[in-house]
Image: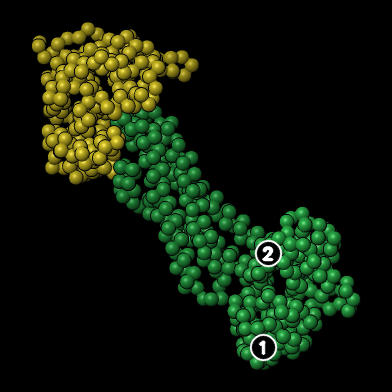
Chain colours: A green, B yellow
Amino acid sequence: MYVALRDLAHARGRFVLMSVVIVLITFLVTFLASLTAGLTRESTSAVTDLPSDRIAFSMPGADDAPEFTASRVTADQWEGWARVPGVESADPLGVATTRAESAGTTASVTALGVADGSDLVPWSTGDVAPGTVVLTPGAAGALDAQNGDTVALGGGELVVAGIADADESFSHTPVVWTTLDDWQTIGARGADASDAPVATVVALTTTGADGAILADADAELGTTTVTRSDARSAVSSFAGENTSLTTMQAFLLVISALVVGAFFTVWTISRSGDVAVLKALGASTGYLLRDALGQAAVLLVGGVAVGTALTVAGASLLPAAVPVVVTAATTLVPAVGLVLLGLVGAGVSVARITRIDPHAALAAR
Amino acid sequence: MDLHLQDVTLVYPDGGTTLTAVDDVDLTVPAGTTTALLGPSGAGKSSLLAVAAGLTRPSHGTVTIGPDVVFTPTTTLAQATRVRLERIGLVFQSPQLLGSLTALEQLELHAHLRGRRPSSLRPRAMELLDAVGVADHAGKRPAQLSGGQRQRVAIARALVGRPEVLLVDEPTSALDHERGTRVVELITGLARETGAATVIVSHDASTLTTVDATVRMLDARIEPAAHLATS
Ligand SMILES: Nc1ncnc2c1ncn2[C@@H]1O[C@H](COP(=O)(O)OP(=O)(O)O)[C@@H](O)[C@H]1O
Ligand SMILES: [Mg+2]
């Protein structure tokens, strides 16, 4: 990169301009990815943080896609799942978003109802007892409630028994944990018959069961079982957000490749005289391509690194209310994608180097 | 090493027809000597030089350096580039320096092109910049040099790889008579010192007092040589 590095230093103005564009695009892409991850977490952490690996839904129509708002499972169904060989645990889980009222304030929360002694609650202090509620830290904050306070949940009064160890939310509302009985006053309450709905879904740990066993059980029990991560799509707020934000990121990646490609097209054309001279002096095509791509790589890696650093720094300065989650997946993965796509764009542009004929070019210069 | 052009013909496609820019030319330039190539504009001088430099393939004929046939109608681009890098020095009509490199770097680049450390060429580069009289400007970029200084850097650049063949196209076209004469003198002197078989294209015979031989080109053909130096 003998000439390329000197060109970078010499034509600084042009490259600084291009670097700023790369920095800003990178910032936009990585920040958007972090925001997407944050919103996804706010929508689905109650599902993705479950200790289970699969979720069984029971939808009103056999062909309906799983959805938390429409699913209702009966006692027969969850007891049926508990008997499936290879299924280690089958816990009924009630899911209902509702209004909660504390002494001071009101907030929207999602109440998760669990059977006695269920392991689903991230609360190491004890089990959720009838007449009590365990608040996640987010719910406690939203309701301004503490241990011993009374919270009105869908009409019933529950005493706060504790604050959960982990923060979880569902469809952008903080989660509170109740017993299945208490939950039924908010969510589904059926008759005492065994085929009446008791919960929303069944959370399964299926370590020993293969796909065929699960499919058979689904058919027999009239349920639809999906993996925990696929169950995110059953949260209605998640599907729409995720699609639009991911589409935006994809567009930004393509745009950045096009911008980088356009810049290097113009740059390569403007230096085609130099390329002709270099060829006349004996520079091989491989040498020239390495030189040009090396230059693009320097520009891209530098700009992307600064843009990514801006996202990391910016995210730490934002108020906690902005749901950004900065991880390697939201920064390094898009950053690598930007560098690779940028190199593709630059590669297509600098490929014209191979077509420069030094004899004709020098005669014209 | 001597430079030989044998039966060289160069035909350009010209719209639907063709244009013969070089027509069956034979030329021998002994090592260490300078041959001037004179002739009117459009005679085919630059085209002949382009064939000798491997910048374009001859339609017919061969170019030989010493015992080696280096360019034929079937030589590949990569082969020609390699020969140019290792055996041929080129000076163009205008200096054609690279804008972002200093005078010294223009010369050190040659080492980088050959996969060596650029600084390994520094003593040789400084020696040549000194020989062409621009050693004091080694750290300057082309924009900071005068036209004459640039042309001198270009001449030094052509010689930095100790080429066996030096090809120079109208080096004096932008210079006045006195400077032009001095540049030709410089080139012939360096050719003698380095043993390079040298061809200078010129349209101004009055600057060629120091060359060893003169060849005229007219309508793509070469006229019999006359020996200026001995006349
Ligand atoms: N790259 C080219 N393609 C087609 N025709 C060319 C090209 N270069 C030169 N010619 C033609 O070849 C002839 C000789 O040109 P040239 O070698 O440049 O002459 P000189 O250097 O003696 O002025 C001219 O008629 C010119 O128009
Ligand atoms: Mg010419």
Q: To which chain does the residue with label 2 belong?
A: A
Residue sitting at x 29%, y 31%: A281
- Amino acid marked by disc 2: Asp
Quarter occupied by the N terminus of chain B: top left
Q: To which chain does the residue with label 1 belong?
A: A
The single residue placed furthest to the top in the displayed view is B224
The relative height of residue B73 versus residue B131 in the rendered view (above or below) is above
**Left or right: A25 with respect to B175?**
right
Residue topped by disc 2 = A53
- Please rate how many residues cluster around mark 1, counting C-alpha atoms within 10 Å: few if below 14, some from 14 to 19, many from 20: many
- For the residue pair A92 and A303, the one nearer the viewer reads as A92
- Where residue A191 sits: x, y (%)? 89, 78
Residue topped by disc 1 = A160
The reply to whether dot 1 and dot 2 touch (C-beta < 8 Å) is no
- Amino acid marked by disc 1: Val
**Left or right: B218 with respect to A18?**
left
**Left or right: B159 with respect to A358?**
left
Residue sitting at x 9%, y 11%: B230
In which quarter of the view is residue A362 placed?
A: top left
**Disc 2 secondary structure class:** loop
